[in-house]
Image (tube, grey):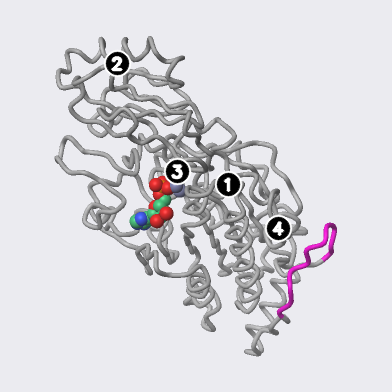
Amino acid sequence: MKRVWNTPLWIIWALLCVACTTQPLPQPTPNKPDTEQGGSSTDTEQGGSGSSTDTEQDGDVDESKESYVVILSMDAFRYDLADMYDTPTLDSIARVGVYSEIMPCFPSNTFPNHYSMATGLHPDHHGIVNNTFFDETTYKTYSISDDDAKADANFYKGEPIWNTVERQGLTAHIYGWVGIDANINNRKPTVAMSYDYRLSQRQLADKVIDAMCQENVEDIPNLVMWYFDEPDAVEHDYSPTSDQTRRVVEEIDDVLAYFMREMRNSPVFEDINFIFTSDHGMVELHPDKYFNIYSLIPNKIQYYYNSNPVTLKPYDLAETKAIYNTLKAHEEEGHYRVWLREDMPEELHYGTYTTRIYPIVLLADTGWKVVYNKNANSGRPTAKYSNHGYNPYDREMHMVFYGCGPAFKRGYTHNKVFQNLNDHLIISHILGIDPATPNDCTWEDIEGLFVTE
Ligand code: AMP
Ligand code: ZN
Ligand code: ZN
């Protein structure tokens, strides 16, 4: 893949002049983002994406010029949160860049999806098949709360984008993204910070600002990936439509205003492509939308996960089909779909990782809670309790994608709900590197986001 430069010539000339005279770059004046519709300039605004330039055809441009991607994942930033709440910074990013509603991979949970965004693979192909799972070949359990498991490279298949980037000579700084604890394919990126729930969003923003605003341009990473664990936590407890969630979403937007303001001090600000996105959506549950399958198949199941999806391994594998048939007969009453692992619908891309997925897979209808538990009421949701993990094609599971910078169109709303695993290809395209192979990305789904050559 060849490198494509979309930066206007005047910026390139400006940078060349700066390089020649060794004068410091003029620092932009920090000010509040323009929040008015149709406003002409905002804090988030960069030099623009007027005419594009291809270095391979134009000898005038600086061929050593770098591209940059800074991507933030805000956990469970559902597609409609920015419409419901006051988010001037994200609104202004949409005005100067691109916006798309996007969808998660299955299952729509945090770990499978972050690692899909990194690798460009479906969870069934990259191996992090859920937040928790048991690997029957190694007899080890993967869990988001187990530091040893998170650092065990054997769990992670595929190639995360930070390795793809560094293998091809660029640099990556990764702050708290799923997968960063392990030496995948025996390597880690230049900066590999583990997730730390004690760090505030502002502290995390400062880390990225420090990395991108270094005086020595050579030290600035080409790729930064960073992560907020909100608004997921507040939505779980209070629902996406609560005052509590409003407050958290608006606080996030304030942090992003600060972030974009500070980012203008970066010597490469005009060349940075910013992405603000998420891993999945969220849906409010209800105490009455609850079904316990235990009494249908009492004492039949040896191992199970009561997450979304519910997965079951019978004591007697010869009984698998009979147990499945029983559950199938109650699908409507129980508000779920059930499949034998090998018969999952194609569009969910799930069930081929047979050593990590139990033989029966049951997915509750979106907004329902289904469990296998001896205790009749175990796991019944409380009012307001919300969750995800449901069918990625249901709109409540959808989330946001904002992008701005020289590679992205300006003021463009994409009308194709693409899957977040395409982030791997989006980053590869912008940085001008080859994506990892194999990958499950679809260029046609994301092509429209970019300025054309
Ligand atoms: P869930 O809602 O169960 O899919 O998981 C979301 C939670 O995962 C967040 O609230 C974070 O606290 C936690 N989390 C996210 N990334 C990590 C990580 N790398 N290590 C441990 N926990 C994480
Ligand atoms: Zn999540
Ligand atoms: Zn969650």
Q: Which numbered disc, 4 or 2, marks the residue closer to the eye? A: 2
Q: Which mark is residue 120?
A: 3
What residue span does the magenta drawing correspond to? Answer: 30-40
Tag 2's secondary structure? helix
Please determine whether, in this image, residue 47 is positioned above or below residue 426.
below
Give the image location of residue 428, x and y in percent. 51, 52
Q: Secondary structure at mark 1?
A: loop
Disc 1: CA contacts within 10 A as few (<14), some (14-19) or many (>=20): many
> Along the polypeptide, which appears first: circle 4 or circle 2?
4
Sequence-wise, which precedes: disc 3 or disc 4? 4
Between circles 3 and 1, the one closer to the viewer is: 1
- In whole angstroms, how far apart are the C-alphas of marks 4 and 2? 47 Å
Type of amino acid at the residue the image marks with label 3: Gly
Can residue 39 be found in the magenta stretch? yes
- Looking at the rendered structure, the secondary structure element under dot 3 is loop
Give the spatial CA distance, label 2 vs label 1: 33 Å
Q: Residues within 10 Å of mark 2 (few under 14, many from 20)?
A: some
Q: Which residue is mark 4?
A: 86
- On residue 155, the disc is none
**The disc label shown at residue 240, or none:** 1
Mark 1–mark 4 Cα distance, whole angstroms, equals 14 Å
